[in-house]
Amino acid sequence: MKKAYELSESEWVRKYKEARAQLAGNYVPERITGRSASAMVGPAKVLHFLSFGIPEEKNFKLIGVQSGTIKLSEFGRLRFISELKKPVSYKRVRIKAKRLGLI
C-alpha cells in the first residue's frame, strides 16, 4: 500500500473527502451502537493515515507553547495560531515527507 505522500494529489484529495464525508454529522446515527461505532473507525483511520502525523506535530508544539518551553515572537504566535486552524493538505504532507528525506 502506498504511503500518504506517495499518492497523487487527486487520489489523496478523493480519499480525504470520502473519509470526511463519512464522519460528517449527517452520517453519524443519533444512537451509537457497536456496529455504527465500528463503522466510524475505518474513516477515522483513513484520515489519520492521510494526515501523516501533522496534527500530532501541531499538538506537540501547542503543548510546548502553552507550557512555556517554546518561545514565540508576536508574529510567530499569530502565524502558529493560523497554522492551527488550517486543515491538513496534500501539500503539507509532501512538505513533511521532503523534510524527513522520504522523497
Image (cartoon, rainbow, N blue to C red):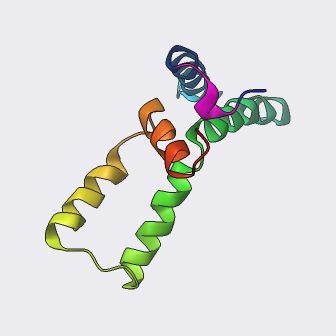
Task: Point out the stretch of residues depicted in magenta.
Answer: 3-8
46 is higher (above) or lower (below) than 53: above
Quick one: which residue is furthest to the right in this view?
34
Q: Position of residue 15 (x, y in %)?
A: 60, 20
Residue in the foreground of this view, choosing between 97 and 27: 97
Residue in the foreground of this view, choosing between 53 and 100: 100
The quadrant of the rendering that contains the N terminus is: top right
The quadrant of the rendering that contains the C terminus is: top right
- Looking at the image, which residue is at 55% across and 25% down? 16
Q: Is residue 37 left or right of residue 10?
A: right
Question: Which quadrant of the view contains residue 86?
Answer: top left
Quick one: which residue is furthest to the left in this view?
74
Q: Position of residue 49 (x, y in %)?
A: 66, 38
28 drawn magenta: no
Q: Is residue 34 left or right of residue 10?
A: right
> How many numbered circles are shown?
0
In this view of the protein, can residue 20 be seen by the observer? yes
Q: Is residue 92 left or right of residue 78?
A: right
Residue in the foreground of this view, choosing between 37 and 83: 83
Question: Which quadrant of the view contains residue 58?
Answer: bottom left
- Looking at the image, which residue is at 53% across and 27% down? 24
- Looking at the image, which residue is at 75% across and 31% down? 42
In this view of the protein, can residue 27 be seen by the observer? no
Question: Which quadrant of the view contains residue 78?
Answer: bottom left
Q: Position of residue 46 (x, y in %)?
A: 68, 32
65 is higher (above) or lower (below) than 38: below
Q: Position of residue 79 (x, y in %)?
A: 23, 57
Q: Is residue 2 left or right of residue 24?
A: right
75 is higher (above) or lower (below) than 86: below
- Looking at the image, which residue is at 40% across and 85% down? 69
